[in-house]
Image (tube, helix red, strand yellow):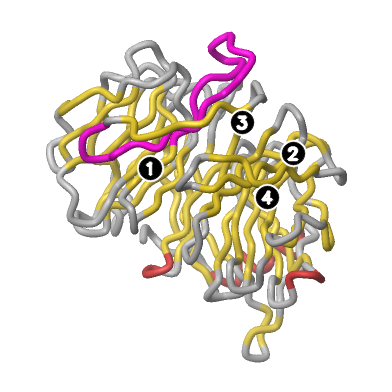
Amino acid sequence: MFACRSLLVLIFASIICGFSAPQLGGQNIAPLVLKGNVNLPGYTGDFDHFAIDQARGRLLLAAEDHGTVEVFDLTTGKHLRTIKGFETPHSILIRPRAATILVTDSGKGMSKLLDASTYELKGVVTLVPGADSIGYDPKENVVYIVTGGKDVDMATSELAAVDPDTGKKKRAITLQDNHVEGMALETNGNRLFINLTQTNKVAVIDRTTMKVLALWPVPVAEQNAMAALDEPHHRLYVGCRKPGVVAVMNSDTGAITNSVPSPLRSDQILFDDAANRLYSPGGEGFIAVYDTADPDHLKTITKVSSAPGAKTGILVPEMKELILAVSPGETKAMAKVLTFEIH
């Protein structure tokens, strides 16, 4: 995807920057190699999350502070179009063979259902204001949406289970926390793990009954916000921002088994089960790469240079790519989409 850069130049640059590279086949090859860079002039503020439409060959990105969703060609990286009609879009749900996509919007106009091919508005998802993070259960065909919280002047938050075809709320639970962030769902069970960032805990929720099964403290750091689940090894990776830390939790007991430093200003952690790796992109301008082969002894493999503000991303396993959004924030820096090849 996109024009290739010289591998030798990238390796040399990583050495100059103080980053190490693992031995692969007797050669020093970085686990992530930059292969594409798309500039997006005229954008300010932050981007939020990506979604992939494999069937149509598209990559979608929520430009939360720009009030748009941006569409790219998944193969070439070319920017195809801008979808307007949002206030503050955050997360995008694209399902195989589904006629619609869902975009959460924390603005007063509520979240949207769009035609998956034309992006025409098909419906509005009316929930408690402040819709943001999502998690999807393909077995039940239910999307879990975080709403409420301090951004809409609420002392509590709500987790709503929504039918993504109709946008109708099926059930919900009120969470006693005004700042709720990322979640992870079991595939072979009914549990959902979600970050209660204000109270520095992880809530374990039964998705069927929408009851809290446990509240696990995260004592190693504050502002726990990201989550990724290694279900076969019963480990939950929890990304924290103060300071930057990835904590490893036993997903059966909530016990912290170990923790490692991570980049500051991170907005996502990405678990690559095929490669036994975890990626933590940070706004500082680098991606921390971890070896998860032994999750109780998480190892930092290297730090790969990205760009300041590159703090959200998505894995594309079929293409062996990691794609990052570079948010300009409050600066005049160029907004970008960076694509890395996974080695």
In the visual, does 118 lie left or right of 260?
A: left
- Of residues 30 and 156, the one drawn nearer to the viewer in this rendering: 156
Q: Nearer the viewer, mark 1 or mark 4?
A: 1
Q: Nearer the viewer, mark 3 or mark 4?
A: 3
Q: Nearer the viewer, mark 2 or mark 4?
A: 2
Looking at the rendered structure, the kind of residue marked 3 is Val
Looking at the rendered structure, the kind of residue marked 1 is Val
Give residue 143's mark: 1
Task: Determine the CA span between mark 2 and mark 1.
Answer: 22 Å
Question: Which of the marked residues, 3 or 4, is nearer the chain's N terminus?
Answer: 3
Q: Mark 2 points at which residue?
A: 201
Q: Does dot 4 land on a helix, a strand or a loop? A: strand
Q: Does dot 3 land on a helix, a strand or a loop? A: strand
Range shown magenta: 145-167
Does 3 appear above or below 47?
below
> From the image, which quarter does the N terminus lie in?
bottom left
Q: Name the residue under label 4.
A: 286
Residue located farthest toward the right when viewing the structure as drawn: 220
Whole-percent x and y of residue 296?
79, 70
> From the image, which quarter does the C terminus lie in?
bottom right
For label 3, count other residues whose C-alpha is less than 10 Å away and answer few (under 14), some (14-19) or many (20+): many
Question: Which of the marked residues, 3 or 1, is nearer the chain's N terminus?
Answer: 1
Q: Are marks 2 and 3 in contact (CB under 8 Å)?
A: no
Residue 229 seen from this side: yes
Q: Mark 3 points at which residue?
A: 180
Q: Residue at x 32, y 13 (%)?
A: 109
Q: Does dot 2 land on a helix, a strand or a loop? A: strand
In the visual, does 47 lie left or right of 11?
A: left
Q: Which residue is drawn at 55% across and 28% down?
A: 328
Task: Determine the CA span between mark 3 and mark 4.
Answer: 25 Å
